Image: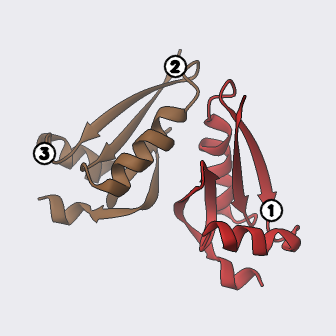
Chain colours: A red, B brown
């Protein structure tokens, strides 16, 4: 069964770059990557916060959060 | 041809976690990932710095640096 990974971003240049370079580079045989644009889907903000996301872009994988560089703080998206 | 990706770390817990979760999760059909322990291979420090690595863990992919969370500043490894 594939592992679910969620990539949270907000459309910023740093986010788009991380999405294109890293989020889409995970092994498709092992991961199912969901891309969530928090600016367009603010209803997903609480879920991201609960997972430990503090800034975007970030990827949540196996219960852990990996903040990739720094585009925007989550608080700036509320 | 596979793209070369270099994952720099320093053996710290944050580094090991990022290595096991992200660096080893890249699509093996598209990427060849080299793992560099800068504590054990200090001769690679200048190359990492030149690539733009400021802290570890970080992955250099396609000429861009992606700092993943924060384990240690590069300056602490000198």
On screen, B15 above or below A51? above
Real-space Cα separation, disc 1 to disc 2, in angstroms: 29 Å
Real-space Cα separation, disc 3 to disc 1, in angstroms: 39 Å
**B15 with respect to A37 (left or right):** left
- Quadrant that contains the C terminus of chain B: bottom left
Question: Splitting the image into 4 quarters, where does residue A9 fall?
Answer: bottom right
- Secondary structure of the residue carrying numbered label 2: loop
Work out whether disc 3 and disc 1 sit on a shared chain: no
**B19 with respect to B21 (left or right):** left
- Secondary structure of the residue carrying numbered label 1: strand
Q: Earlier in the sequence, mark 3 or mark 2?
A: 2
| Any part of residue A14 in sight | no
List the single residue furthest toward the top. B1
For mark 1, what is the residue?
A: A37
Q: Residues within 10 Å of mark 2 (few under 14, many from 20)?
A: few
Output the chain of dot 3: B
Picture disc at residue B42: 3
**A41 with respect to A25 (left or right):** right
Residue at 46% over, 38% down: B23
């Amino acid at each position: 069964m594939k592992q679910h990974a969620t990539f949270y971003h907000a459309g910023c240049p740093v986010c788009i770059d991380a999405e294109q370079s890293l989020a889409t580079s995970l092994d498709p045989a092992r991961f199912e990557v969901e891309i969530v644009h928090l600016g367009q889907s603010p209803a997903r903000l609480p879920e991201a916060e609960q997972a430990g996301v503090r800034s975007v872009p970030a990827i949540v994988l196996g219960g852990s959060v990996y903040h990739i560089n720094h585009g925007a703080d989550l608080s700036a998206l509320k």
